[in-house]
Amino acid sequence: MTARYLLDTNVCIEIVRGRHPGIQTRMAALSYGNAAICSIVWAELELGAHLSPKGYACARAQIEVFLLLPQWPFDRDSAERYAQLRVDLQRRGQLIGDHDMQIGAIALVQGLILVTHNTREFSRIPGLQLEDWQIEC
């Protein structure tokens, strides 16, 4: 895969909602394969679809566009990086959510820039490159 960016769940939700045209502009400017999601983000999108007041079928149809993107799994290397991150953040008293640590671990292992609006928490992960397209757009 040639992805450069890993999209966080909140960015995917904003793409579906269409409230930040700059995000769509950034996505449209990317070559195919330069943006990806990971298995953790897909799980969060699926959960949101199941809980949606619109009903699962309608919400699921809206997120299916993300199935066209490359997907990175939470694999063995990511699991090892996650464990290291959790120990480090726990010792520093700066824990973040498990899913966010897993997403961060995948981005680190794959050398991807994480696109998120949740920079406050993700910035606790040493070495993680972040971009917030909601602010930048």
Image (cartoon, helix red, strand yellow):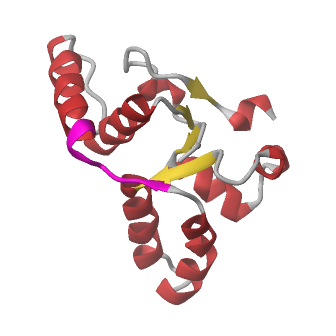
Q: Measuring from the top left, give residue 90's x and y in whole percent.
A: 17, 20
Residue 119 vs residue 128, the one in the foreground: 128
How many marks on residues?
0
Q: Measuring from the top left, give residue 107's x and y in whole percent.
A: 43, 35
Relative vertical location of residue 30 with respect to residue 45 in this rendering, above or below: above
> Which residue is the extreme one toward the front?
1
- Residue 19 part of the magenta segment: no
Q: Measuring from the top left, give residue 68's x and y in whole percent.
A: 60, 67
Residue 38 vs residue 97, the one in the foreground: 38
Residue found 58% across the figure and 85% down from its top: 58
Q: Say which quarter of the image contains residue 32.
A: bottom right
- What segment is highlighted magenta in the picture? 71-77
Q: Measuring from the top left, give residue 33's x and y in whole percent.
A: 64, 51
Residue found 79% across the figure and 43% down from its top: 26
Query: Is 105 left or right of 90, judged from the image as shown?
Result: right
> Which residue is the extreme one toward the top?
92
Residue found 36% across the figure and 32% down from its top: 109
Residue found 37% across the figure and 63% down from its top: 43
Relative vertical location of residue 117 with respect to residue 24 in this rendering, above or below: above
Relative vertical location of residue 35 with respect to residue 135 in this rendering, above or below: below
Relative vertical location of residue 97 with respect to residue 75 in this rendering, above or below: above
